[in-house]
Amino acid sequence: MASRIKNMTEGSPASLILTFALPLMIGNVFQQLYTVVDTMVVGKALGVNALAALGAADWMNWMMLGIVQGLTQGFGILMAQKFGAGMQEDLRKVIGNSVILSFFSALILLISGQLLARPVLLLLQTPSEIMENALLYLRVMYLGIPIVMAYNLLACILRSLGDSQTPLHAMILAAIVNIVLDLIFVLGFGLGIGGAAAATLIAQLVSSFYCFYHIRRIDIITLTSADLRLQKGLPLRLFMLGFPMAFQNAIISIGGMIVQFVVNGFGVLFIAGFTATNKLYGLLEVAATSYGYAMVTYVGQNLGAGRTDRIRKGMRSSLLISLITSVVIALFMLLAGKAILSCFISGTPEEFNLTLQIAYFYLTIMSVCLPILYVLHVTRSAIQGMGNTVLPMVSGIAEFIMRTATAILLPMLIGESGIFYAEIMAWIGADVILVSSYFIVIRKTERMLAGNKPAVD
């Protein structure tokens, strides 16, 4: 098990980032696979209305997931820094306190999600014909928030130690379980959209157990009862790292809900087409997310070791690799997009053709602009790895402003298609903040280390 732990303070930055990101990328592909299969099964077996219901619930579900991921990724930053600095006792305390914070955060999110699900769907003017399905999907998914929190925390612990292999295996296992349960619950037992949600949660529970089993075998992070006590100042420090990232994701989600509000006014077929492409969003950014995780760990470990020269080299390598990857993915989607989207859509020939036309036009716009998104992920993750989660939060606010303004104003000028540019303008707004912020943070970090001030307390 120890061989999966990777010290990223030595060796070629490009090679380290690639070898770390590739397993994550494959794992994310499997994670997206079961999201895609969910959508295919729902869209084909239950029809356009059920597909639209998934879309209506998407951003609300993503908001909770984004908060969970933001918190745990913030905790993982300090873990990576402690590991890079060789502070194993401190690392165990960070993990122990992260477990406590995650437990209580999951309970708060579960309760608030159940209370807010219906009021928010009503506020977004969700069409009555898809309201109950959308609400049912959210109810089931929100019940599973503790499971989602557990998996994300366990995966962050592993990634902070340089292990991207175990999360890969966990995702492959989860994908298989989810696909099998989708077929059993939805097609076999006729449980509908609630069955699809339940299949996803059970799959994540399996992946959580898998990660936990392997973490128990890593001697340097075997926790004692002392590690599971709140340490003076440590919960606040962890919260100050995790909260800005969670808030950033929440703000982005609220912007997405405003977009969904506008889309809901264009009718069920438009919602279905919009949803079909949004379900491919994960595949479009799958490599970007993986490079982002790699950069958080790489930068965090090298900051702990005081190697800002390696941070700069890693940043250049990661940007080059990610831009090449984005172009390859964009070309694939432009060529195969219609065939893939067709797997999500059902209905009369007229409904099918109109929904596909809407979906492919949106996919084309996102594919052409994909390099912008990849710059966003790499740059934001590098800044977070250096322990600054506030500036990325500011970039999330910029995303919110650009996404919301575009969604509200552009359809008034050019019609329904204007909504497709909201995501692109959000990426551009974030990049403007992040690129300039990176240079500010790296220079500040270099001055701090040159003044013999420790990067890790």
Image (cartoon, grey):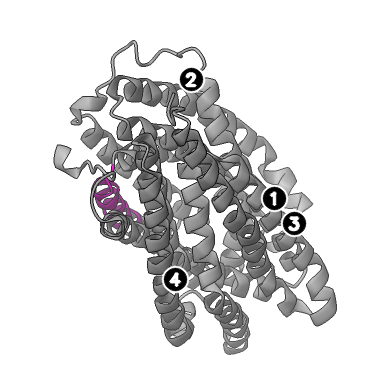
Per the image, the residue denoted by label 4 is 323
Q: Position of residue 304 (x, y in %)?
A: 37, 35
Indicate the secondary structure of the residue bearing disc 4. helix
- Name the amino acid, label 2: Leu
Label 1, label 4: how many angstroms apart (C-alpha)? 24 Å
At which x and y percent is residue 24?
32, 55
Q: In the rendered image, which quarter contains the N terminus?
A: top left
Magenta segment: 162-178
Residue type, mark 3 in image: Ile
Mark 3 and mark 1 residues within 8 Å of each other at the beta carbon: yes
> Disc 3 designates what residue?
401
User: CA separation, marks 4 and 2?
Assistant: 37 Å
Which residue matches tag 1? 397
Task: Give the SS element for disc 1.
Answer: helix
Give the residue pinned by disc 2.
234
Instruction: Report the front residue among 303 and 218.
Output: 303
Q: Marks 3/1: CA distance?
A: 6 Å
Q: How many marks?
A: 4
Magenta-span inclusion, residue 172: yes
Give left or right: position of 419 versus 335. right
> Residue 34: horizontal and vertical position, in percent?
38, 60
Q: Earlier in the sequence, mark 3 or mark 2?
A: 2
Label 4 or label 2, whichever comes before in sequence order:
2
- Return the residue nearer the eye: 150 or 4: 4
Look at the picture and state if 242 lies above or below 428.
Answer: above
- Answer above or below: position of 152 versus 11: above
Q: CA separation, marks 3 and 2?
A: 33 Å
Kindly check if marks 4 and 2 are in contact, taking CB atoms under 8 A apart as contact. Answer: no
Say which residue appears at 47% left-offset and 26% top-offset: 103
